[in-house]
Image (cartoon, helix red, strand yellow):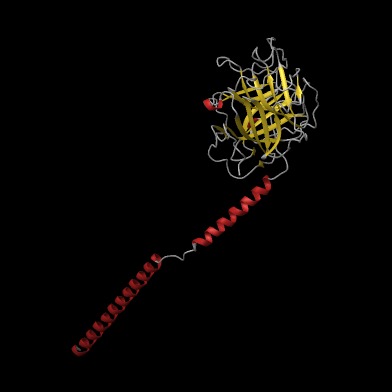
């Protein structure tokens, strides 16, 4: 009895030890599995090569850009807003088909067709100022400290973004073509070197949305009232009698303009000095070949205005197309003395330059006018076109 009990006790002990060994093995197995799981969770995940991601993004961006470009291309400039009217003039005239009015997403605001295609000139912007006075309209609006905006009749002037030569903005001026209507920006102040008899050189990029016909649509000018205390005035009147209280303007100027589908250089004296003339005088020169102004194309316009001696030169895209001097006068409203520009004089006729204007002024009737200006420079030496 005692022997069996002892044998049973030893068997029980062995079984208990085997159970303990099995449980330790199980615990160790769970510990090892837990460690393996922990290692697996902390191991780094596979890395996607960065260049593959960038290439995909680049491909997507290129595709988007390409589709955007093709969507924005087109054959014309939009114009937009600007009211319309009509009338007749001091010469004769008539216009050709009216230009579309829809503009440049620009005219910031009321243009009728904001979905018109963008019109771009050379890529990039014009860079730093290359003269004594510059305006690239990149502020997105006309600076009231720099410009005095004058509008009359249906004339509208605004900075817009759709039709530009360089950068992101350009000036748009619109008019219905009615006589007397204008949209002009006047300089408020220019450096001293740009005041006086000159010569003064200028450059601007100009775009015309459609052919306008017409006679004498002023574009750019340099003028003076003859008195620094008298500001320039512009009205929709076409009266030229200097004694009339309703005369169109109160200053003398040199200008370049559109005339009968071509160009005009000339000067108008609304306030001549008594020693120069007794009343209103207009003289003009026209290109010998009657070069037609470009339409739906940015053109680099350059000019030289001088009042000592009195002379003007006009270049387009680097080519001289017109000049006015003693030998080159195609029209005069008064009898000219031989060998002089006016009344025996060939210098000091204007009275020097005090301010400059850019835009449109319909001295004669035309079709609807939509013109754009960009990258304007004034200097005492020739500016030249952008490369």
- The quarter holding residue 44 reads bottom left
* Percent x, y of residue 26: 33, 75
Q: How many marks?
A: 0
Relative image position of residue 74 (x, y in whole percent): 71, 44
Determine which quarter of the picture holds residue 328.
Answer: top right
Q: Position of residue 118 (x, y in %)?
A: 67, 41
Which quarter of the image is occupied by the N terminus? bottom left
Query: Where on the picture, by quarter, is residue 83?
Result: top right
Who is closer to the viewer here, 134 or 192? 192
Q: Does residue 176 appear in this view?
A: no
Name the side, left or right, on which 7 lies relative to 290. left
Q: In the rendered image of this protein, does residue 271 appear above or below residue 216?
A: above
Observer-nearest residue: 45 or 293? 293
Please state which of residues 382 and 212 is positioned toward the viewer in this rendering.
382
* Closest to the observer, 354 or 312: 312
- The quarter of the picture where the C terminus appears is top right
């Amino acid at each position: 009895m005692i022997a069996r009990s002892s044998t049973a006790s030893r068997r029980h002990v062995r079984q208990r030890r085997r159970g303990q060994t099995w449980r330790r093995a199980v615990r160790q197995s769970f510990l090892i599995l837990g460690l393996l799981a922990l290692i697996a969770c902390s191991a780094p995940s596979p890395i996607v090569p960065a260049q593959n991601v960038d290439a995909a993004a680049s491909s997507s961006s290129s595709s988007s850009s390409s589709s955007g470009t093709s969507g924005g291309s087109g054959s014309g400039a939009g114009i937009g807003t600007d009211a319309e009217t009509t009338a007749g003039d001091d010469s004769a005239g008539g216009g050709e088909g009216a230009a579309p009015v829809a503009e440049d997403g620009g005219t910031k605001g009321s243009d009728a067709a904001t979905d018109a295609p963008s019109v771009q000139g050379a890529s990039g912007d014009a860079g730093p100022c290359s003269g004594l006075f510059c305006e690239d309209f990149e502020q997105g609006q006309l600076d009231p400290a720099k410009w005095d905006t004058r509008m009359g009749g249906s004339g509208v002037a605004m900075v817009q973004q759709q039709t530009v030569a360089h950068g992101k903005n350009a000036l748009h001026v619109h008019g219905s073509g009615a006589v007397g209507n204008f949209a002009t920006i006047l300089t408020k102040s220019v450096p001293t070197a740009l005041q006086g008899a000159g010569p003064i050189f200028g450059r601007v990029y100009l775009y015309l949305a459609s052919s306008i016909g017409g006679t004498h649509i002023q574009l750019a000018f340099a003028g003076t009232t003859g008195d620094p205390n008298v500001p320039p005035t512009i009205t929709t009147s076409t009266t030229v009698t200097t004694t009339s209280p309703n005369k169109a303007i109160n200053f003398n100027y040199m200008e370049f303009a559109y005339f009968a589908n071509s160009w005009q250089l000339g000067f108008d004296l609304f306030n001549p000095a008594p020693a120069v003339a007794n009343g209103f005088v207009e003289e003009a020169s026209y290109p010998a070949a009657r070069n037609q102004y470009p339409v739906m194309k940015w053109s680099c316009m350059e000019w030289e205005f001088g009042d000592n001696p009195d002379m003007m030169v006009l270049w387009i895209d680097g080519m001289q197309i017109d000049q006015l001097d003693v030998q080159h006068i195609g029209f005069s409203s008064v009898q000219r003395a031989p060998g002089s520009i006016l009344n025996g004089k060939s210098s000091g006729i204007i009275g020097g330059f005090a301010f400059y204007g850019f835009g449109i002024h319909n001295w004669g009737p035309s079709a609807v006018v939509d013109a754009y200006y960009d990258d304007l420079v004034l200097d005492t030496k020739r500016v030249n076109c952008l490369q």
